[in-house]
Amino acid sequence: SVVILRIDNLVKHYGQVRAVDGLSLEIGQGEVLGLVGESGSGKSTVGKCVLRLTDPTAGTIELAGRDITRLSRRAMRPLRRDVHMVFQDPFSSLNPRFTIEQIVGEPLLRHKVADRRGASERVSAMLEKVGLRQEMRSRFPHELSGGQRQRVGLARALILEPKLVVADEPVSALDVSVQASVLNLITDLQRDMGFSCLFITHDLSVVEFLADRIAVMYLGKIVESGPKAEIFAAPRHPYTQALLSAAPVADPVRQRERRRIVLGGDVPSPVDPPSGCRFHTRCPLAYDACRTDEPSLTDTRGDGHPAACHLITADRIPDAAAHR
Ligand code: SF4
Ligand code: MG
């Protein structure tokens, strides 16, 4: 299948802060990758590098086969049609002086894909797709609810029919009561329009229905990735096992059966990450080698579900819940 986004060995350091420290991933056409991690794991930095809102320190980023890592702002401009961002806080990303019609239609005019009249028609169709009434066109962002503003953010991101959408915590600033409806909308739009999506979130349950694959980040690196169903059913890395054990599940039987893994301490500082396995300061299964040897992200079983842990062998998967 066609690869829309390929990230190879991405590094982004802000001074002493090693936000992203050697990360590789791929997203195929029409595929949704959920990039999951606690705050400070570097997941938002990955999104910013892909959008070229910040320059990577090292590594490469390819968009639809084209290396965009070192493109100038000017050379990047036409490619901005192909990749769009949906932000956590739609309010700060929507110009308060513009009407909803201007905000949603602006990318069409900027990229000269439509004249005013054509833009107006496409805005109309797009508002309908995201479930906003036509009378919203003349409103300003401050007149809208959080959920409506996020729908405007989606309409603006999708109006050029991008190949890739980077969504950074798009529902976490919304009231819980509207989160589900916006997530369902994103799911429907993705299935309908077929864009690829890098969906960044701290909350695994948010991507349970949306993602095709999941990649779990810890301190600037991916510790496990694989098909969503396998990550949820049989997580391999002790960190993923802990995250999942803390995520709410709808089924009360499953909830009772599940053994909660409580991690000690906070995420260590990305200024001075722990030696060896970066997770060793919090891992219930850590042993001597974990403090000195760094495990690599390896597909030990050759089944497209790699994890970075010394304890994973061809016939053994660690179980962090068994150790208390
Ligand atoms: Fe835990 Fe060691 Fe595996 Fe790291 S390598 S996840 S510290 S057991
Ligand atoms: Mg973030």
Image: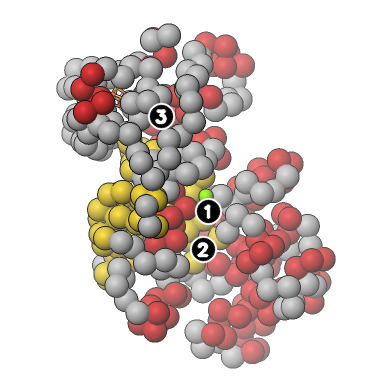
Helix, strand or loop for disc 2: strand
* Badge 1 amino acid: Asp
Q: Which residue is mark 1?
A: 168
Query: Looking at the picture, does residue 284 appear above or below residue 65?
Result: above
Helix, strand or loop for disc 1: strand
Residue 80, x across and y down, in percent? 44, 74
Q: Which residue is mark 3?
A: 240
| Left or right: 22, with 300 as reference point | right
> Which numbered disc flags the more N-terminal residue, 3 or 2?
2
Q: At 68% from the left edge and 80% from the top edge, which residue is drawn?
A: 102
Residue 309, x across and y down, in percent? 26, 28
| Left or right: 10, with 198 as reference point | left
Q: Which residue is mark 2?
A: 85
Label 1 environment density (alpha carbons within 10 Å; few <14, some 14–19, many ≥20):
many
Q: CA distance from mark 3 to mark 2?
A: 26 Å
Q: At 56% from the left edge and 72% from the top edge, which residue is drawn?
A: 159
Q: Quadrant of residue 275?
A: top left
Q: At 56% from the left edge and 50% from the top edge, which residue is drawn?
A: 169
- Quarter of the rendering occupied by the C terminus: top left
Q: At 47% from the left edge and 53% from the top edge, which residue is drawn?
A: 44
* Badge 3 amino acid: Thr
Query: Looking at the picture, does residue 44 appear above or below residue 302?
Result: below
Is residue 209 at least partly visible in the picture?
A: no
Please state which of residues 4 and 134 is positioned toward the viewer in this rendering: 4
Disc 1 to disc 2: CB gap under 8 Å: yes
| Left or right: 276, with 74 as reference point | left
Callout 1: CB less than 8 Å from ligand 2: yes
Residue 90, x across and y down, in percent? 65, 61
As drawn, the label of residue 88 is none
> Which numbered disc flags the more N-terminal residue, 1 or 2?
2
